Amino acid sequence: MSQVLSLGRDVKRSRGGAGRIIAVANQKGGVGKTTTTINLATALAATRKSVLVIDLDPQGNASTGLGVPRSARTVSIYDVLMRDHDLGSALIDTAIPKLRLIASTVDLAGAELELVSAEERAERLRQALRNPESGEVLEAFDYVLIDSPPSLGLLTLNALVAADSVLVPLQCEFFALEGLSMLMKTVERVRGAFNPDLRMEGVVLTMFDRRNRLSGQVEEDVRSFMGDTVFNTVIPRNVRLSEAPSHGKPALVYDMRCPGSMAYIKLASELLKREKKQKAALNQGVE
């Protein structure tokens, strides 16, 4: 990753009226990253926000979790990144109103190797999202959530370079802070090399078990380390969250009243309130 970042350069960002792009990222697997992406997207769509999910993980779990079969993924994010397909041609409707998807396929597994020798390899996704045709497509969305792979490779780097902010799902376990520290260093390098405007959307604690003393200790440590960056909403360990993807549904559709679904509804509300405060503060600063 450090060798890739050393090739970076500052660039100007311009997206017109497109919505906010949030990279959901954590180099550690099994932390609830995809679960957070699809359920937060569903919760935002339920508030009448138009949402696009970009599945940038070769495993394609976000695509599966949103009920899109592999046979329907005729144009994928791989085609957009590596074959210069138009962004609009990759859009797929989901069963959830106001929520659309750009899916992943197995082809994306080879993209990490192909990107190594590609020109502007860290900026392929940003370029795909910034061209005039894509700008018109993105103007229809209030939020774009990018589900990143569980690594700090070139695909995750592309997500961070393209994003306005990064949302970090963090499992309440022993090595949580160590992994968070590594990711924060990567974010700082991306800011310096590629994307000076990238900011932390926040850290969301996942798989929280109130019966486990370790979960409480991790929460205390993370909040002490990250302060207000950590969302107040905590996602509990919940079997319904785990079951829902096997049915091709977000948990909010599978069982809206389960504790996990209710937590993601609260998370979406908190995210919207944070954005409102940030806009108010910005307006005061302008005045």
Image (cartoon, rainbow, N blue to C red):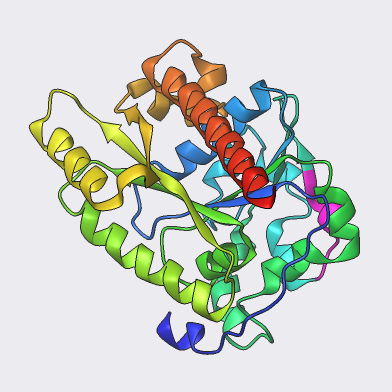
Please indicate whether residue 94 sits to the left or right of residue 225 in the image.
right
Task: Give whichever of 236, 276 is nearer the camera.
Answer: 276
- Count of labels shown? 0
Residue at 55% in and 89% down: 7
Q: Position of residue 178 (x, y in %)?
A: 22, 60
Q: Determine whether 54 is above or below 82 in the image.
A: above
Residue at 71% in and 25% down: 95
Task: Give whichever of 212, 13 is nearer the camera.
Answer: 13
Q: Determine whether 79 is above or below 96 in the image.
A: below
Q: Quadrant of the N terminus?
A: bottom left
Residue at 50% in and 84% down: 4
Q: Position of residue 22 (x, y in %)?
A: 58, 50
Q: Residue furthest top?
A: 257
Residue at 75% in and 42% down: 72
Please indicate whether residue 70 sits to the left or right of residue 90 in the image.
left
Q: Is residue 53 visible?
A: no
Task: Give whichever of 181, 286 is nearer the camera.
Answer: 286
Q: Residue furthest left?
A: 213
Membership of 273 in magenta stretch: no
Task: Report the magenta residues as a range.
Answer: 84-91
Q: Is residue 209 visible?
A: yes
Q: Position of residue 207 (x, y in %)?
A: 29, 34
Q: Residue furthest front?
A: 287
Membership of 86 in magenta stretch: yes
Q: Position of residue 188 (x, y in %)?
A: 43, 71
Please indicate whether residue 134 sits to the left or right of residue 181 in the image.
right
Please indicate whether residue 23 sits to the left or right of residue 67 in the image.
left
